[in-house]
Image: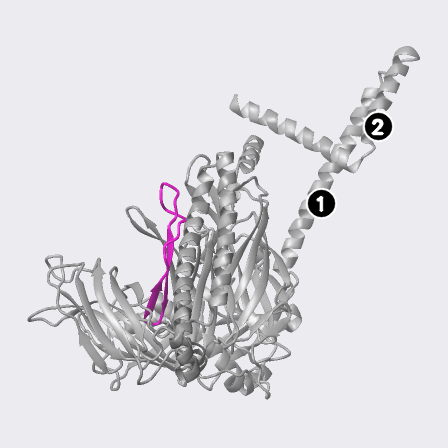
């Protein structure tokens, strides 16, 4: 019975498909119905021709059905023929390419070797961090150079072929060299211990290479057809920082071969391709990062059966199964996850086989190249479960003529390439999903800004630099001795892991060894407006930002970010929105400014050599880590100020010690470091955290009370009070009372507006929406009290100064003095 029903449904669907095709090809066919009615009326009332009309209709229907079947066969043959033509196109005769090796020899040492060495060095460094040998605890790349001798290309000739519209050159690749210089420093794990130098002194890579010119010759994509053969020779050095003898470490050579082979397979074996750009102009700019807006527009032709399984493994189905699959595709609920490095963002869930998202995300790139990956997921209705369906990716690269190249894997492993001549130009691409036979994804990418190592920026077809000098180069001061002012303004769209739906965020900023912490806010869109100062560090050090939410039963991490502080220029403020990584939502707005110490000292009067001192009060610490087996510690603090060292008393068997000790140091601008130690009578002392106290920006004779989180440990904070004592000033009256008064009036007006907003929410009965305005109102109230105290202090100081001036005038004028005494 089931087979008969399926065959009957197949016949019905074929008839319906046939008539739909007839109507599309013959639009006048609906006029046949009234014509038949007229013939029927004539046959009934005028004369009868019912004997031959059915025969004519049957003949006509047979001829039409035959034409329909013939057209279907012709279309199917045309599709197969086009597929054969595109995949097996004519191949040119074998050509010799000695000219290519000669050209490569001329440009290798000065151009290609530095570029390839720099590019592959960054790739190898990333792979070393995540794929270490079991014998190696830590490894560092000390030196990387591909040498002076290039690889040999096409020793047996080369051929050109065509895949679709893309021309492809196939040639042999053979690189056997002993001129390379790759040196690693490894910290060896148990049972060996110590450090060892690993030197790769020879390399042999052999395979078949594909070269694909794209964008009218502006760039070349290159990749291996299959994983190449890799052989290396490893030597173990000695001397210098080497602590182990120059002996072979078992398994290291095979591990390096596997690492290099896997790296090549991951980045440049078909269909993965690398790009070598050929710009007409070289502006000699080193891009260190950029800001990219990624928009996921829509998807089309999604099919659950095609996305979840290979067609070769699926059983053939009848038309009723196809109808069921069609309805299942309408019930698809999908979303896309966008990934760039460790930064991920997700679209909303949309139904159907052609969902529309139009979701735009702010993404940050920390290099001059990057890969934007798009992962398609299906959400199970009525559940939090979701299934992975397919992926696609776009690679992008900054070109030294200030443009950007995008490329991706196209249909049938082809190439999709786009060129953005300047920042701000939109690029749209339609990507097929990889490894499946159905589905396309439409995306749009816009590079909003490229950041360069010299501090200049490139956006909207303009390159912006600060303080250009007369000779055309940037007027950059030396990095040593400068200060970095970081202002954390606000955040938006932060997430929470709290079941009650509340978010109490705070942020930790780490730059070098200095760790700073903001106050705790109470909103998903917090406003901090807190300013921090750091000593600038050379070498491209990133500022690490971690965002936390203070919950009832602990602290949850709600994202992190990295910001490059390379190329900062004095007098120019960098304002950025930093998207949080390792979460699906959240951004922080940060302003960064570089200030020279001389300007800072002149404007703030920060140092008074020989006339002032630093007063440090070590009050207490809390939640220290336990260093002893009994679950406690015996903590004390060792203070280092330049060459001077001091220490507190030891507090025994406690994780929350209280010292209340005061230490004084001459104010010479030296770093003030605190090292919290665990005291042991017999064994060496162990560290339970350290921190740096920033004091240079403190106003004279004003005490700063702060809790500073300890570094190098999982938890712990120390409470200090620090004052810059300057006897000559004795709290001089401030010259910026007018700005403080103006700021107080601004806060007052903002509080009035917040009161009006709270009153309207109360009248509307919207109690849930009052939490955010109430927290902001409390913040404004605290700021108002702070400014009022400052104004009262300044008023008192000004009155005292007026009395002193009045007394000086009286003392300097005898007549006024006698008049005042006589009266």
- Residue 513 on the magenta segment: yes
Q: Is residue 459 above or below residue 44?
A: below
Query: In which image quadrant can residue 18 be found?
Result: top right
In the displayed image of the protein, which residue is found farthest to the front?
A: 822
Q: Nearer the viewer, mark 1 or mark 2?
A: 2
- Residue 305 on the magenta segment: no
Residue 496 image point, x, y percent:
39, 47
Q: Residues within 10 Å of mark 2 (few under 14, many from 20)?
A: few
Mark positioned earlier in the residue sequence (1 or 2):
2
Q: Is residue 298 or residue 759 the one in the foreground?
A: 759
What SS does tag 2 mark? helix
Q: Which residue is pictured at 55% across the width and 78% down the height?
A: 285
Would you say residue 615 is visible in this rendering?
yes
Colour scheme in the image?
one colour
Residue assigned mark 1:
74
Residue assigned mark 2:
31
Q: Are marks 1 and 2 in contact (CB under 8 Å)?
A: no
Q: Is residue 20 above or below residue 130?
A: above
Residue 573 image point, x, y percent:
51, 70
Q: Main secondary structure of the magenta part?
A: loop
Query: Which residues, given as a range, are shown in magenta?
Result: 495-523
């Amino acid at each position: 019975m089931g087979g008969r029903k399926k065959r009957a449904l197949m016949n019905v669907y074929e008839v319906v498909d046939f008539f739909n095709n007839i109507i599309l090809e013959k639009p006048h066919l609906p006029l046949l119905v009234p014509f038949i009615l007229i013939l029927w009326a004539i046959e009934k009332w005028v004369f009868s021709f019912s004997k031959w009309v059915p025969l004519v209709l049957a003949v006509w229907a047979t001829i039409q059905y035959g034409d329909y079947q013939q057209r279907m066969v012709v279309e199917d043959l045309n599709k197969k023929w086009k597929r054969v033509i595109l995949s097996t196109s004519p191949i040119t005769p074998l050509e010799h390419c000695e000219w290519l090796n000669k050209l490569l020899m001329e440009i290798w040492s000065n151009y290609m070797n530095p570029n390839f060495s720099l590019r592959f060095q960054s790739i190898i460094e990333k792979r070393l961090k995540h794929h270490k040998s079991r014998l190696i605890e830590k490894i560092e790349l000390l030196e990387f150079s591909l040498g002076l001798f290039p690889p040999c290309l096409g020793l047996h000739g080369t051929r050109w072929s065509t895949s679709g519209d893309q021309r492809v050159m196939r040639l042999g690749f053979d690189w056997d060299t002993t001129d390379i210089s790759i040196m690693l420093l490894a910290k060896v794990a148990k049972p060996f211990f110590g450090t060892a130098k690993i030197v790769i002194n020879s390399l042999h890579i052999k395979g078949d290479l594909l070269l694909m010119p794209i964008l009218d010759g502006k760039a070349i994509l290159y990749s291996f057809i299959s994983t190449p053969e890799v052989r290396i020779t490893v030597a173990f050095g000695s001397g210098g920082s080497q602590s182990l003898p120059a002996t072979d470490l078992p398994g290291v050579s095979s591990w390096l071969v596997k690492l290099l082979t896997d790296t090549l397979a991951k980045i440049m074996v078909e269909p993965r391709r690398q790009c070598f750009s050929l710009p007409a102009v070289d502006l000699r700019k080193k891009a260190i990062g950029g800001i990219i807006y990624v928009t996921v527009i829509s998807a089309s032709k999604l099919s659950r059966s095609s996305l979840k399984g290979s067609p070769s493994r699926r059983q053939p189905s009848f038309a009723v199964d196809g109808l069921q699959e069609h309805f299942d595709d309408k019930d698809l609920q999908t979303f896309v996850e966008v990934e760039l490095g460790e930064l991920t963002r997700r679209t909303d869930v949309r139904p159907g086989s052609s969902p529309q998202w139009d979701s735009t995300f702010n993404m940050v790139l920390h290099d001059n190249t990057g890969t934007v990956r798009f992962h398609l997921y299906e959400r199970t209705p009525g559940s939090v479960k979701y299934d992975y369906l397919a992926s696609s990716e776009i690679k992008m690269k900054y070109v030294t003529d200030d443009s950007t190249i995008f490329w991706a894997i196209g249909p049938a492993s082809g190439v999709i390439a786009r060129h953005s001549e300047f920042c701000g130009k939109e690029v749209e691409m339609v990507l097929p999903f990889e490894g499946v036979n159905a589905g396309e994804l439409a995306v749009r990418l816009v590079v909003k800004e490229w950041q360069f190592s010299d501090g200049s920026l490139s956006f909207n077809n303009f390159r912006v630099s600060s303080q250009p000098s007369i000779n055309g180069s940037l007027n950059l001061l030396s990095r040593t001795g400068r200060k970095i002012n970081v202002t954390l303004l606000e955040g938006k769209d932060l997430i929470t892991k709290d079941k009650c739906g509340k978010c109490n965020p705070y942020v930790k900023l780490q730059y070098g060894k200095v760790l700073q912490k903001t106050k705790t806010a109470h909103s998903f869109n917090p406003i901090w407006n807190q300013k921090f100062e750091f000593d600038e560090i050379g070498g491209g050090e990133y500022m690490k930002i971690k965002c936390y939410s203070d919950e009832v039963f602990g602290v949850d991490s709600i994202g992190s970010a990295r910001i490059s502080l390379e190329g900062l220029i004095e007098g120019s403020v960098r304002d950025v929105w930093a998207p949080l990584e390792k979460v699906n939502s959240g951004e922080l707005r940060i302003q960064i400014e570089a200030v020279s110490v001389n300007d800072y000292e002149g404007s703030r009067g920060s140092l008074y050599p020989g006339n002032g001192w630093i007063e440090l009060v070590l009050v207490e610490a809390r939640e220290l880590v336990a260093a002893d087996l009994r679950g406690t510690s015996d903590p004390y603090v060792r203070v280092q100020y330049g060459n001077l060292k001091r220490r507190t008393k030891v507090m025994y068997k406690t994780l929350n010690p209280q010292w209340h000790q005061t230490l004084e140091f001459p104010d010479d601008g030296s770093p003030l470091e605190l090292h919290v130690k665990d005291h042991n009578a017999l064994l060496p002392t162990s560290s339970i955290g350290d921190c740096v106290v920033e004091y240079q920006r403190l106003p004279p004779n004003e005490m700063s009370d702060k809790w500073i989180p300890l570094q190098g440990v999982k938890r712990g904070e120390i409470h200090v009070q620090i004052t810059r004592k300057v006897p000559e000033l004795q709290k001089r009256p401030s010259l910026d009372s007018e700005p403080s008064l103006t700021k107080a009036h601004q806060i007052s007006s903002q509080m009035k507006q917040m009161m009006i907003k709270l009153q309207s929410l109360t009248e509307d009965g919207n109690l849930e929406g009052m939490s955010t305005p109430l927290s902001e109102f409390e913040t404004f109230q605290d700021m108002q009290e702070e400014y009022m105290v400052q104004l009262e202090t300044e008023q008192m100081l000004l009155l005292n100064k007026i009395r002193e001036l009045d007394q000086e005038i009286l003392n300097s004028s005898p007549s006024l003095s006698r008049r005042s005494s006589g009266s």
